[in-house]
Structure formats: structure tokens, C-alpha cells
Amino acid sequence: MNTIKYKKHISAVIQYIMVAMFIVSGILKMVKVSFYQDLLQDLHPVYQEYMVLLGVITFLIGVLLSFRRTFIYGFIIGLVFFGGTIAAHLQHGDIFVIQVIFVILLSVVSYLKYPSLFKN
């Protein structure tokens, strides 16, 4: 019984950290902080034109992950989003380890909250 309690607490802590990260990152992209402008300029100049859209999507993922009823939608959109970021970083020869770590963390939280998603 204690193991179940610990799993719930661990998944909740990781979930809240990821939600905070998504929401803060989305807001910073929407207000076009220079850090993100430089990062996107290095990847591809066209990406700067879509910075607000990327911020809205990132913010939306954070909001969806924060509510129980919409968590699964946030999980799916988050995996798709990180798949796109991994592809963009691969295309330009950048390091994509951070994105892979977030995919793993998102998957671990989803598995701990909804193990039925990962069964046949």
C-alpha cells in the first residue's frame, strides 16, 4: 500500500514540475524573450516567425497536463510536440538529449497515473 502512495506522490511531483516548465516556457516564448529568439535563430530563421504559436502550443500542453480530465490529451500533444522538437534538432545537428529526457519523464508520469494506457 505504501508503494502505491509513493508512486502517486512521485508522479504528482514530476507532473507539477513539467506543468510549471511548460507554462513558463510557453509564456516566455509568447513574449519573445531574447533567449528563445537566439535559440530559434540558430535552428532556422523561419522558426522565429512561429515563436508565438510555439508558445501557445507549449502553454496549452501545460494547461492540459494540469487537469485530470485533459491529462491524456496533454500527454499525446506533448509527445507529438517533443517529436517535432527532436526532429528539428536532429535536422540541424543539435543536441536533443533534453527533449528525450522530457519524453521519458512525460511517459513515466503517464504510466504512473494511467497504467492502462500502456497495456494492450
Image (cartoon, grey):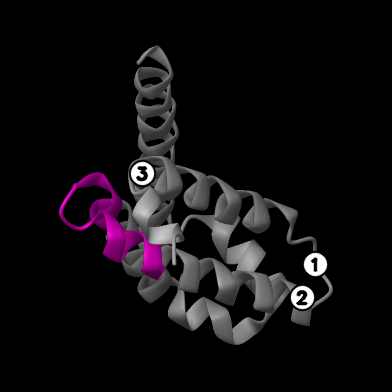
Q: Tell which circle, 2 or 3, labels the residue nearer the N-terminal end.
A: 3
Q: Say which element carries label 2.
A: helix
Distance in Å between CA atoms under marks 2 and 3: 25 Å
Secondary structure mostly taken by the magenta-highlighted segment of the chain: helix
Write the residue at 34% across / 42% down.
Answer: 113
Q: Residue furthest front?
A: 120
Q: Which residue is mark 2?
A: 90
Q: Residues within 10 Å of mark 2 (few under 14, many from 20)?
A: few
Specify whether residue 76 is painted magenta.
Answer: yes
Q: Which residue is mark 3?
A: 19
**Label 2 sits on what residue type?**
Leu
Q: Is residue 31 visible?
A: no
- The magenta stretch is 63-77
Q: Which mark is residue 56?
A: none
Q: Which residue is mark 1?
A: 94
Between 46 and 72, the one nearer to me in the picture: 72
| Residue 66 percent across, percent down from the top left | 25, 45
Q: Say which element carries label 1.
A: loop
Write the residue at 56% across / 60% down.
Answer: 36
Q: Quadrant of residue 116?
A: bottom left
Write the residue at 27% across / 54% down.
Answer: 71
Specify whether residue 57 is painted magenta.
Answer: no
Q: Tell which circle, 1 or 3, labels the residue nearer the N-terminal end.
A: 3
